[in-house]
Image: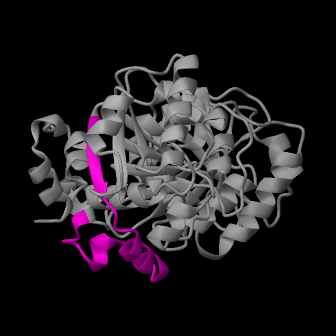
Amino acid sequence: MSSVMPLPLNQSATTLQLVLYAPDNRHIARLGSVLAGHVELRWVDSREIQPRQMLDSAPESAVILLDYCGGNAAYSSDIARQLSAQQAYRSLIGIGTTGPEQAAHLLAAVRSGVRDFIDIDNTTAQMLEVFERVGSMPAATKPAAAPVAEAKPRGRLVLLLGVRAGIGTSTLATHLGALLATQDPAVTDHNQHHGQLLLLDVGQPSADAALYLGMESHFSYEEALSNVERLDRTFAATAFAHHSSGLSLLGNASGTLLKKHEPSALLERLRSVFPTTLCDAGGLPIQLLPTSLLQNATDIWLVADQAIGSLVSLDQTMRELEQRGQRDARLKLIVNRFDANGGLSDMQIAQRFSLPLLATLPDRARVLRSNAGLGHLLTESAPRDPYLKALQPLLQALDGKPVTAHASSSPLTRLANLLGK
């Protein structure tokens, strides 16, 4: 069999040339059927034609397709590294299939220099969208982030900002995210795309959210910063970790210390992919919080408790936000670990700092710790716990429903809510 197999085209004009550089031609029939009339496609046998030889014979504008299906993934990653090492620039796109190994294959492709990824079962429109996106990238060895199209909707970004470490922000973020994802009808079928709700964990210590959710993530926040141009719905559904509730997760590996950075491009892209993003910034000193994260946030929820140290930190946080020009109507207060006999009341704290009181969460530290030790959320082990009931104002706020102000509730009513009555 010839090592180079052209695919006959119909008579319509074509502008895009694809080269399937693989050890076999098993994908030619499928690609030819889906892309007929849109591209010029040929197969080059990678067992017989060396990378340099293939590059010399292929048009400079050609897109190179590499096979990441099944046992060819490691082989194609090696080829991708060889091609990336060549001086001549080419766009590399990986081909995969839906399956449990897809995430690992996609990450291997990205790390070896592949610019984007298509599923062999994608429709014509989906494949052409990937080719168009890759074709619009600057011709550089490492592509710059492509701007998000202005026409795309920008999702909501809710920043959960714990005023100090150990305040319970990550616990709140994971329970709120899992509960909201479970209640979202768009993700009730968890075999479908996980693309409605993202938990972005930039807090310290790193990977707390993954620990509480009992998840392991193979794609990190740092890698996302370096691969913004590849990030679309398909990439997020494959590379990001997913909880059984339907919640997607993006965070850093355990032990990672965030360097000073401004993730504007990544945040814009995430907001174009996910309708709602919860960002857990618990434990991250306010001085290290990226300004672009504050600027992109549609809501900033400050998490504090009744302890004197927490109130001092809340005051410092408010001063820092004011210095950065970010003290505005987006700020609301969540009082965590509330004890009716613990000092200042929730309303007194809110009034002291001139903040709207969004929610008051009861002190359930013991039961939360015991469940975390077992790798469970309360949503799984104790769905009627008072802590979860106290999250209702937050769920209503995220769902766009009107939230009854705490000021209109009597102390007796609020105490009953905290006790789960």
| Residue 181 coordinates in the image, percent (x, y) | 29, 57
| Residue 397 coordinates in the image, percent (x, y) | 23, 40
| Left or right, residue 166 beside residue 33 | right
Q: Number of callouts in the render?
A: 0
Report the colour scheme. one colour
Which residue is located at x 16 percent, y 38 percent? 403
Quadrant (top left/top right/bottom left/bottom right) for the C terminus:
bottom left
Outermost residue to the bottom: 374
In the rendered image, is residue 421 in sight?
yes
Which residue is located at x 47 percent, y 69 percent? 212
Residue toward you, 43 or 108: 108
| Residue 228 coordinates in the image, percent (x, y) | 60, 39
Residue toward you, 40 or 380: 380
Residue 247 forms part of the magenta stretch: no
Q: As displayed, is residue 145 above or below residue 393? A: above
Which residue is located at x 15 percent, y 65 percent? 420
| Residue 220 coordinates in the image, percent (x, y) | 63, 55
Quadrant (top left/top right/bottom left/bottom right) for the N terminus:
bottom right
In the rendered image, is residue 188 in sight?
no
Which residue is located at x 71 percent, y 34 percent? 143
Q: As displayed, is residue 82 above or below residue 13? A: below
| Left or right, residue 62 beside residue 230 | right
Give the quadrant of residue 410: top left
Residue toward you, 105 or 379: 379
Residue range (magenta): 357-386
Residue 367 forms part of the magenta stretch: yes
